[in-house]
Image (spheres, grey):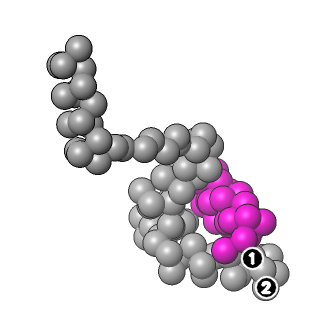
């Protein structure tokens, strides 16, 4: 999925959280229907019979918040052989 499609999906999930659907029911835009179907198939939202609207699942909520997180740093771990050799050199001094 490209970034623009991901951004559209995130924006649609925010609308679901606020209004209960990707778009108003009278909107029959093909792209809106595709986004709705993609979110349902990815288990990002589900239909709630009690409230009569779509609600976000935990996966959908984590997908929204994941876009706001900064990328994590990648740390390099040294093999034990390298760290053991460095420890021996420190003890010898």
Q: Which mark is residue 30?
A: 2
> Is residue 8 part of the magenta span, yes or no?
yes
Name the residue located 78 percent from the left edge and 80 percent from the top edge: 31
Secondary structure of residue under mark 2: helix
Q: Point out the residue furthest to the front here.
A: 92
Can residue 12 be seen in this snapshot?
Answer: no
Q: CA distance from mark 1 to mark 2?
A: 5 Å
Residue 54 shows up from this direction: yes
Q: Position of residue 43 (x, y in %)?
A: 46, 72
Tell me: 35 left or right of 86.
Answer: right
Residues under numbered marks 1 and 2 in contact, where contact means CB atoms less than 8 Å apart: yes
Residue extent of the magenta highlight: 1-26
Task: Give the overall secondary structure of the magenta segment.
Answer: helix
| Quadrant for the N terminus in the image | bottom right
Q: Looking at this view, is 35 or 50 the one in front?
A: 35
50 sits to left or right of 63: left
Please tell me whether residue 52 belongs to the stretch shown in magenta.
Answer: no
**What mark, if any, has residue 61 been given in the picture?**
none
Q: Percent position (x, y) of residue 60?
A: 51, 60
On-image quarter of the C terminus: top left
Q: Residue at x 51, y 67 (%)?
A: 45
Judged from this view, the residue extending furthest toward the top is: 93
Query: Which residue lies at the image location 45% right of the left edge and 60% below the top edge?
Result: 59
Q: Is residue 2 above or below residue 76?
A: below
Q: Secondary structure at mark 1?
A: helix
Q: Quadrant of residue 27?
A: bottom right
């Amino acid at each position: 999925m490209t970034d623009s499609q991901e951004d559209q999906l995130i924006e649609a999930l925010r609308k679901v959280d606020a209004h209960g659907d990707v778009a108003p029911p009278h909107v029959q835009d093909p792209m809106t229907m595709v986004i709705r179907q993609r979110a349902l198939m990815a288990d990002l939202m589900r239909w709630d019979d009690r409230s009569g609207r779509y609600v976000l699942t935990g996966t959908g909520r984590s997908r929204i918040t994941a876009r706001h997180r900064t990328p994590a740093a990648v740390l390099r771990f040294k093999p034990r052989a390298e760290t053991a050799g460095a420890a021996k050199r420190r003890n010898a001094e």
